[in-house]
Amino acid sequence: MNESLQSLFFKFLKFGVVGLSGLLLDFGVTYIAKEQLRWNKYIANSLGFLLASGSNYYLNRTWTFHSLDPGIGWQFSKFLFVAAVGLLLNNLIVYLLTERARLSFYIAKFVAVVLVFLWNFSVNYIYTFTR
């Protein structure tokens, strides 16, 4: 993949904007499910994360990576696999920071989102949205 550093940088920025929209969706859904509906924090966290992942796939496919891959089902499967690994990492980080380090849930969730963002961009760039 011969891509300029500038092009890669703009993809990273776009991925970040999409990620920010996903972050707002993730935190909003998580908050409603955990605080208003009183769901288990891990279920609420998973729901927020998964809904944001679906939104992020669409936005990244069309805007960030301009993917025209006709194998959308396979590509979406790869994206969901990356997201599922990210979800496991997200919940592991939330668990470690809340239960072991005794940080507040939302601080732990924020740290998890930042770390999983780096995972998601790297793997989606290298694996999911390749031609």
Image (cartoon, rainbow, N blue to C red):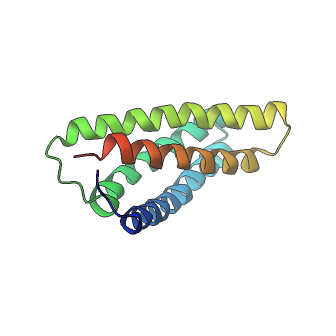
Identity of the residue drawn at 72% across and 32% down: 95
Residue 24 x, y percent position in the rendering: 55, 60
The answer to whether residue 124 shows anywhere in this view is: yes
Asked if residue 19 lies left or right of residue 31, the reply is: left
Q: Position of residue 57 (x, y in %)?
A: 35, 50
- Residue 130: quadrant of the picture: top left
Nearest the camera: 31 or 36? 31
Q: On the rendered structure, is 35 left or right of 3? A: right
Looking at the image, which residue is at 49% across and 61% down? Answer: 16
Number of numbered discs on residues: 0
> Which residue is drawn at the image coordinates 81% and 46% (left, top)?
104
Seen as rendered, the residue at the extreme right is 102
Q: Looking at the picture, how far across and down is residue 35, in whole percent?
A: 69, 47
Percent coordinates x, y for residue 128 in the rendering: 32, 42
Determine whether 61 is above or below 128 in the image.
below
Q: Nearer the viewer, residue 81 or 7?
A: 7
| 85 vs 99, nearest the viewer | 85
Taking the image as shown, residue 49 lies to the left or right of residue 7, namely right
> Hey, which quadrant is residue 81 in on the image?
top left
For residue 22, above or below residue 89:
below
Nearer the observer, 41 or 12: 12
For image coordinates 64% across by 51% down, the residue present is 31
Q: Is residue 40 above or below residue 56?
A: above
Would residue 40 be visible to someone looking at this image? no
